[in-house]
Image (tube, rainbow, N blue to C red):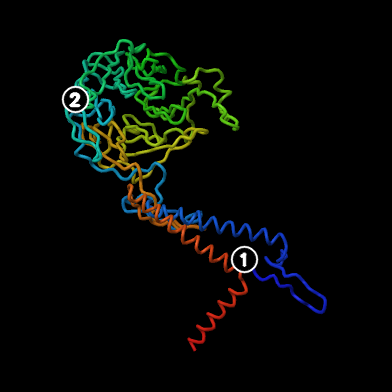
């Protein structure tokens, strides 16, 4: 980077300065001095910053990026992905497998799944051979590092319920509405509080303060920061509705009575709802004419961000549309169009959300049970624009499910219960991984991704710190040596020439 600064002598009294960088700069000028200073700064950052940082992550991470890996040409993924494309598309599921140890004790149809702490509850549902009737039974399983334990009988509901909405919020479990053994929809709300010692719900009590304004069954439910939102559902007559109600958390720590929010643009029941960012997404289910293809997005009014320090507040792009809507209410509903709609609406599908991704699996499409699994990742600015499917992430071809319930446990999605392709009720469970492994090796333009040691825990962290410190110390010594050699360029060249000369003489 330095070169010699000796001028070139062309003749008596004529001296031409030496040019560098393809003749663009004078070797003794400010331009070349600036270029060299920038290059040396980058070298110092590389040796004392980047390389020690990579040394740490090579110790504690499973993979490490080296350089700028643009347009990877070579990708190698671990065998755990079981044949998924490498790298796996966002939202892809590692192929489904039977999880017999998690089979439900009953038919597993028309019930509601609810997670409360370290326990998973399957609440109500229907039972019977010739005709299906609602049941008050509750099954409970424990969540632990191994996954889901075997199911056992839990405290039953005071009354039979099917197609109820269930949620856990502020330390309490809520079972809302649903059909009874005599009514197609009810207004009741049952509340269960986990025991402080066992963590189990021992009793369910009816809460008259939370009685629904009208009977509902198959309503979608979304838990938001300050309460519970109940979307649509079937009325007592069995017709899908457009109502949206919210029970807000009061200052006493209890939910207040239901208040009306902006209604849906179209009726919807037996759908799924999830909060993604500042919007509630509703997908799947039925509208007034049958299985629905369009997904709905409800935007929640948020408080304008306050300026902090010397920074200006972040501009809310929906501030004008939000207007003076009360914070926490829904100020706008929008429906998807085109590719944002499900390619084929389906009845009786299992639906769930994980990591901001919305899934729909199984059900009946075009009158036939389907093993298809589809997912979408909503974006704040555009919402849902398309749905993705991958053959390897579909349900097993011989195990489609209709009316199953879905839940995410750790890094796995599980389908519980439902009917098989022949229409027979099945309590069996299926499990799929929600987190395919990243490539262990990638080679692209200007960079690589290489395997790391992946040492976990406190020991791995301490060894990582030692690796980073060792790399920093070694590079610091090398920089000092480079500085000495640079300051004594002539003597260093002579020393190198002498060493090379001696080696050459030895070789001769």
User: Element at badge 1?
Assistant: loop
Q: Is residue 212 left or right of residue 22?
A: left
Q: Depth check: give the residue in front, 12 or 192.
A: 12
- Mark 2 vs mark 1: which is more N-terminal? 1
Q: Quadrant of residue 226?
A: top left
Q: Depth check: give the residue in front, 18 or 317.
A: 18
- The x, y position of residue 238, in whole percent, is 33, 17
- The x, y position of residue 53, in whole percent, is 46, 53
The image shows residue 306, relative to residue 185, as above or below, that is below
- The x, y position of residue 91, in whole percent, is 39, 41
Q: Quadrant of residue 161?
A: top left
Q: Is residue 326 visible?
A: yes
**In the picture, which quadrant includes the N terminus?**
bottom right
In the rendered structure, find residue 330 and report the number of the disc placed on it: none
Q: Is residue 262 left or right of residue 451?
A: right
Local packing at callout 1 (Cα closer than 10 Å; few below 14, some 14-19, many 20+) is few
User: Disc 2, disc 1: CB below 8 Å?
Assistant: no
Q: Which residue is mark 1?
A: 1
Q: Is residue 94 left or right of residue 149?
A: right
Q: Quadrant of residue 396?
A: top left
The image shows residue 22, relative to residue 61, as above or below, that is below
Q: Depth check: give the residue in front, 393 or 158.
A: 158
The image shows residue 61, relative to residue 122, as above or below, that is below
Q: How many marks?
A: 2
Q: Residue at x 50, y 24 (%)?
A: 302
Residue lying at the far right in this picture: please name it: 13
Q: Is residue 421 left or right of residue 222?
A: left
Q: Residue at x 25, y 30 (%)?
A: 120
Q: Which residue is mark 2?
A: 154
User: Element at badge 2?
Assistant: loop
- The x, y position of residue 92, in whole percent, is 37, 43
């Amino acid at each position: 980077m330095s070169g010699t600064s000796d001028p070139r002598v062309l003749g008596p009294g004529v001296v031409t300065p030496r040019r560098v960088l393809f003749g663009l700069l004078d070797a003794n000028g400010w331009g070349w001095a600036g270029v060299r200073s920038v290059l040396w700064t980058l070298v110092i950052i590389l040796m004392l910053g980047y390389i020690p940082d990579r040394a740490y992550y090579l110790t504690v991470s499973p993979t490490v990026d080296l350089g700028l890996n643009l347009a990877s040409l070579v990708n190698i993924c671990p065998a755990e992905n079981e044949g998924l494309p490498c790298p796996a598309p966002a939202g892809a599921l590692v192929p489904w497998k039977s999880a017999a140890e998690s089979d439900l004790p009953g038919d597993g149809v028309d019930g509601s799944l609810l997670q409360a702490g370290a326990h998973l509850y399957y609440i109500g549902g229907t039972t019977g051979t010739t005709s299906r009737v609602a049941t008050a039974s509750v099954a409970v399983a424990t969540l632990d590092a191994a996954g889901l334990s075997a199911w056992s009988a839990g405290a039953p509901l005071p009354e039979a319920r099917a197609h109820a909405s269930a949620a856990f919020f502020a330390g309490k479990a809520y079972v809302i509405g649903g059909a009874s053994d005599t009514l197609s929809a009810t207004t009741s709300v049952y509340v269960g509080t986990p025991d402080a010692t066992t963590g189990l719900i021992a009793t369910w009590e009816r809460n008259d303060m939370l009685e629904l304004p009208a009977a509902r069954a198959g309503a979608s439910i979304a838990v938001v920061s300050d309460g519970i939102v109940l979307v649509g559902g079937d009325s007592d007559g069995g017709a899908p509705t457009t109502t949206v109600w919210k029970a807000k958390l009061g200052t006493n720590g209890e939910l207040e009575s239901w208040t009306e929010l902006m209604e849906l643009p179209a009726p919807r029941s037996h759908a799924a709802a999830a909060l993604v960012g500042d919007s509630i997404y509703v997908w799947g289910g039925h509208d007034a004419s049958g299985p629905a293809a369009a997904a709905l997005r409800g935007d929640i009014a948020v408080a304008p961000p306050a300026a902090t320090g010397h920074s200006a507040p972040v501009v809310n792009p929906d501030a004008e549309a939000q207007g003076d809507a009360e914070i926490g209410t829904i100020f706008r509903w929008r429906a998807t169009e085109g590719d944002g709609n499900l390619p084929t609406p389906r009845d009786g599908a299992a639906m769930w959300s994980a990591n901001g991704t919305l899934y729909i699996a199984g059900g009946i499409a075009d009158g036939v049970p389907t093993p298809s699994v589809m997912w979408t990742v909503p974006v704040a600015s555009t919402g849902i624009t398309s749905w993705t499917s991958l053959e390897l992430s579909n349900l097993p071809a011989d195990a489609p499910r209709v009316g199953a319930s879905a839940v995410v446990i750790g890094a796995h999605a599980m389908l519980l219960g439902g009917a098989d392709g022949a229409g027979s009720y099945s309590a069996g469970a299926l499990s799929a991984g929600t987190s395919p492994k990243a490539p262990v090796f990638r080679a692209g333009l200007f960079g690589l991704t290489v395997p790391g040691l992946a040492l976990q825990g406190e020991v791995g962290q301490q060894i990582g710190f030692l690796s980073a410190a060792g790399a920093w110390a070694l590079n610091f010594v090398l920089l000092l040596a480079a500085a000495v050699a640079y300051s004594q360029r002539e003597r260093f060249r002579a020393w190198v020439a002498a060493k090379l000369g001696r080696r050459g003489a030895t070789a001769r």
